Image: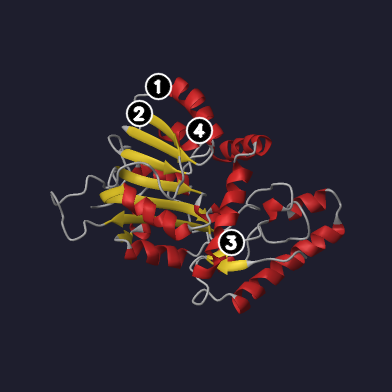
Amino acid sequence: MRKVQLVSAGDASAQVLFEGLHARMMSFYNEESLRREYYEKAQVLNEVWRPGTYHWVLRSMAAPGLSVLDLGCGSGHAFDNLRGRVVRYVGVDCSVAQIRKNQKEKLAAGGTDNGTFLASSLYDVGLPGDSFDIVFSLFVLEHLVWPRRFLRETVRLTRPGGLIVILCPSFRSAGRMPSLPHGGPGSLKEKVRRADLGGALRHVWSRLYWPQVVKRRYPSGRYPWLINLTPACLHEPWATDNDALYMVDRAECVAELSSLGADDITEQVLAAIAESPRHDEGLCFIVARKGYGGVRGDGESRLGPTVPDPGERSVPS
């Protein structure tokens, strides 16, 4: 088993390592042949947002007249699913080539009156603060070297009273993630399909091994914001989430958002929106409302978040 480095993102002495990892990952995401496979697969998996999913909850919250910011927009599937529901959509991604593709294909098909795609770092987006009613990221947080910086930028871009929505895998609760060694390239299903019995057995063993290692050596209180400095994608062919870096811990994300002035209202939202999904322990879903910093402004939030479809309930302000 190859050597693995797990380091807390809060470790000041490791920042040089994080800078190097960030540079390697930017090259990885902008490599032409991989980029096509990576974003095309994301598009297929997320092409239609169906009732009973967390994507559907986001769609229900994006009421007509609202502005939304999609951080890590990838193939732009959110733009397709929110078209006609929001007055302003901005999608941001680190891949310059993918943003150009989105601009050419998405905006040509849907018009440019309510859509914009921007190539930018997700840690320092060149947009004014307090600008969007909803700022969301879909399966992005787990791929970031500096998740706390990302959350800070997310809150900055959300207007007071607006919503932050995060959807990603919940790796820390399981104690494992696909970017850790799992008996060679490929999923367990792929190993079984190609009759790689040894690889399949090592994969199963790894599933049992890593939770014990993480729990024993890297307790969350002592090692917050745990980052995998040696993701499998840098050593093996790309497979889903073998490029994951952050061992997502929902509790620390909620605590960080709260410290930034955005309170967790996930349960209220799920209870208020029809056709919400059942709880999935494998996923981290967060809806947080940004506060007013002690000043209520006009005293009212424009967000319910209102669900415009007849017969559906809404979340009270």
Tag 2 and tag 4, C-beta contact below 8 Å: no
Name the secondary structure under disc 4. helix
> Distance of mark 4 from mark 1, alpha carbons?
16 Å
Residue topped by disc 3: 17
The answer to whether 217 is drawn above or below residue 31 in the figure is: below
The amino acid pointed to by label 4 is: Ile
Residue topped by disc 2: 114
Task: Indicate the position of residue 59 as horizontal and vertical percent values.
Answer: 40, 41
Q: Is residue 28 left or right of residue 256?
A: right
Residue topped by disc 4: 99
The amino acid pointed to by label 1 is: Gly
Q: 237 or 299: nearer the eye?
A: 237
Q: 2 or 190: nearer the eye?
A: 2
Q: Earlier in the sequence, mark 2 or mark 4?
A: 4
Task: Indicate the position of residue 89 as horizontal and vertical percent values.
Answer: 37, 35
Label 2 crowd (10 A; few <14 / some 14-19 / many >=20): some
Name the secondary structure under disc 1. loop
The amino acid pointed to by label 3 is: Leu
Indicate which disc residue 111 carries.
Answer: 1
Tag 3 and tag 2, C-beta contact below 8 Å: no
Label 4 crowd (10 A; few <14 / some 14-19 / many >=20): many
Tag 2 and tag 1, C-beta contact below 8 Å: yes
Tag 3 and tag 1, C-beta contact below 8 Å: no
